Image (cartoon, helix red, strand yellow):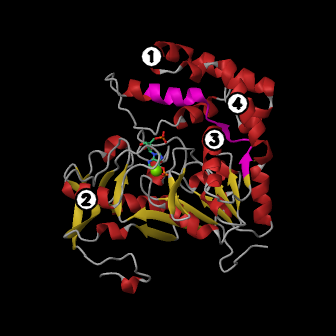
Amino acid sequence: MSRHTTDPRSTAVVGLQWGDEGKGKIVDLLAGEHDVVVRYNGGANAGHSVVVGGERFALHLMPSGVLSPGVRSVIANGVVLDPEQLFTEIEALESRGVKLGPLFVSDRAHVVMPYHKAEDQVREAILSGGIGGASIGTTGRGIGPAYAEKVQRGAAVRVGDLQRPDVLAARVRTAIEMKRHLFEAHAASVPRESWDADAIVEQAASWGARLSPSIADTRRLLRDAIDAGERVLFEGANATLLDIDHGTFPFVTSSAPSVLGIGTGTGLPPRSIGRVVGIAKAYQTRVGAGPMPTELLDATGDAIREKGREFGTTTGRPRRCGWLDLVALRYAVEINDVDEIALMLLDVLAGLDELKLCTAYRVDGVETDVFDPDASALAQAEPVYTTLEGFAEDVTQARSTDDLPA
Ligand code: IMO
Ligand code: MG
C-alpha cells in the first residue's frame, strides 16, 4: 500500500528552463510522500543540490530520493550511467553518515565509458576550432557520445553487459576501433588510458561486479510498484529547454528531460505519470552556449549571479543570468502539461529597483508570443518587457501568498 495517500498519483518533477531550477530541493521535499524515486534521463551532467546534515551536497547521478528513509531509488534505462561517479557519490554520502535506502540500476541503462568523456572533449574542441561550428559548452561528462553510442548500437555497453565478459570485451574493442582516427588525430589532448581497451574491459568488469546487487529489471519493478498502488516520483534531470528534440537545438543535451522522456526512459506508459510539477526560477539562467533572449550582461545580471550563487554545481562555471522569460516558460508548461509550478529563488530578486518580465518577443520588428526553440530562430528574438516595481522585503520566511509583496 502507498504511504501518505492524500494524493494517490505518481508525480513528475521537471525543469522548465535551461536547468538548475532547484529540482533537487523539490524532489527532496516530495520524496517522503512517495515509495520510489526514479531518474529516467541524462547522467552525471545533472547537479542537484541537497542539504545533508546542514551541509550542501551535490548529487549528479544518485536520485535525490536516496536521502529519504524508506524510499527506493531507481536509475532507469533512459539514464547514461557513469559507474565511477555513482560510487563516488555513494561513498561521499556514507562518509557523512547518511544511511542510504535501496538503489536499483536498470540492466538496460547505457554505460558512460572513459572514451566517451574523451570524445566529448575532443568534439567540443573541434566545434570551437573555427571550422564553422560552435561548441555547445557541454559538461564534459561524456553524455552526448554515450547516447550516440546507444543510437548507433553495435558498440554500446549496457549495465547488463558489464556482467557478460565476452560481450563487454567485443563492444569496448569495437567502440575504440570506431574512434581510433579521432583519438590518434587528437592524441595530445586524449589521455591514453581513456582508450586502452584491455584496461577498460578489466575496469568495466569490476564495475559490473560492484553494481551486481543493484542491477535489476527496473521496468518490471516500477510496473509492479504502480500496480500495487505505490507512488512513484519521476525525477527529471537537465530541463525542458535542453531537450534533444524540443529544446534550443543544437545547444541542448542528448536526452528528453521533460515528461516526454519518462515513457521511453522507464518503460512505463505515459498514463502512469499523474501529477506534473514544473520547476522554474523567478529569473532565467543558462550554462554553456546558446541563445537566451533575456540575458543580462550588466550589473543587474552580476547581482543576480552573486546573490543566487549561480555557479555550476557540475562544472563550477558562472551561469548566464537574465529576466524571467514567460514566452519560454509557457512553451515549457505546454510541453509538460504542468499542473503546478514551483517558483524558486524569488528571494534573490529582493532589493532590485525594478523587475522585468519578458511577455513577448520581437522578431523582424513584429511582436509574437510564439516560442520557436530552434537556436538560429531564437537568436533573432528580442525580448519585450513589462516592468514591475521591485520589492525589498525578505521573502524567505513567507509561508503563503499573503506573506509576499504585491
Ligand atoms: P540540472 O539537472 C544546467 C547543459 C550544459 C550544456 C548542454 C549540453 O543541474 O538542471 P551535456 O553535458 O548535457 O551534453 O551539455 O546542456 N546542461 C545543463 N545545464 N543544468 C543541467 O542539469 C544541465 N545538463 C546539461 O551546460 O550547455
Ligand atoms: Mg546543473
Frontmost of labels 3 and 4 is 4
Q: Tell me whether circle 4 and circle 2 mark residues in contact (CB < 8 Å).
A: no
Q: Earlier in the sequence, mark 1 or mark 4?
A: 1
Q: Where is residue 173 shown, x and y percent of the image?
A: 68, 19
Label 2 sits on residue:
303
- Disc 3 marks which residue? 81
Residue span colored magenta = 104-123
Q: CA distance from mark 4 to mark 2?
A: 45 Å
Q: Is residue 136 visible?
A: yes
Residue 367: within the magenta?
A: no
* Mark pair 1, 3: CA separation: 27 Å
**Residue 340 x, y percent position in the rendering:** 50, 71
Residue annotated with mark 4: 204
Q: Residue at x 80, y 67 (%)?
A: 228
Circle 3: is it few (<14), some (14-19), or many (20+) Cα within 10 Å?
many
Marks 2/3: CA–CA distance? 36 Å
Q: What amino acid is found at the position of numbered circle 4 in the picture?
A: Ala
Q: Say which label, 1 or 2, has the lower sequence index.
A: 1
Q: CA distance from mark 1 to mark 4?
A: 25 Å
Tag 4 secondary structure: helix
Q: Residue furthest bottom?
A: 402
**Residue 191, x across and y down, in percent:** 52, 21
Residue 188 marker: 1
| Amino acid at dot 3 | Leu
Gap in Å between the C-alphas at discs 1 and 2? Answer: 40 Å
Residue 393's place in the image compared with 172, above or below, is below
What quarter of the picture does the N terminus occupy? bottom right
Residue 197: x and y in percent read 66, 19
